[in-house]
Image: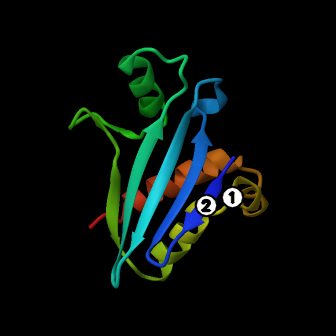
Amino acid sequence: MSSITTTKEVINNTFILHPNGSDDYVTITCEITIKKTTYILDYKYTFPEKNNTIQQNMSILKKLELYDNDTQAPYEGDYVYKNGLTEQLIKYICMSDTDLSKVSGNIHYESYRLSIIKSIQLFWQ
């Protein structure tokens, strides 16, 4: 389930990630603000109602490596310089699950999307 909305300078994509194929999951809304020379990515997390503790929620993010142990906080996003490579990463992170599964080869689209998020983290400004 992936849904994309867009305005002239902001793109939103909402998707679900399951850590290691488990039944646990998190719904992530990725908001991308497009500036002249940068992309600003913000991530918002929504957890299932069955998770009744913050520790359960943080455990999911830790398994996905979307939790910063140094700051003791969830990964909230990044500023990345706009260039050909980051443009393609943004394009792919915004794809629907169906479209991403068509270009991810033998890798499940959720794992592929998580790899894209981790790749973007490497290019923070």
Instruction: Identify the image quadrant of the C terminus.
Output: bottom left
Up/down of 7 relative to 32, above or below: below
Up/down of 87 relative to 21, above or below: below
Packing grade of label 2 (10 A; few <14, some 14-19, many >=20) is some
Query: What color scheme is it?
Result: rainbow
Identify the residue position indicated by label 2 in the image.
Answer: 4
Q: Quadrant of residue 95?
A: bottom right
Q: x%, y% of residue 24? A: 59, 25
Q: Quadrant of residue 10?
A: bottom left
Identify the residue position indicated by label 1 in the image.
Answer: 96
Q: CA distance from mark 2 to mark 1?
A: 7 Å
Q: x%, y% of residue 18? A: 60, 34
How many callouts does the rendering have? 2
Q: Measuring 42% from the left and 45% from the top, which residue is drawn there? A: 44
Q: x%, y% of residue 67? A: 36, 37
Q: Earlier in the sequence, mark 2 or mark 1?
A: 2
Which amino acid type is shown beneath numbered disc 2? Ile
Instruction: Point out which mark residue 71 bears.
Output: none
Position of 18 compared to 120: left or right? Answer: right
The reply to whether dot 2 and dot 1 touch (C-beta < 8 Å) is yes
Q: Measuring 71% from the left and 53% from the top, which residue is drawn there? A: 97
Position of 10 compared to 97: left or right? Answer: left
Check disc 1 and report its element: helix, strand or loop.
loop
Which amino acid type is shown beneath numbered disc 1? Ser
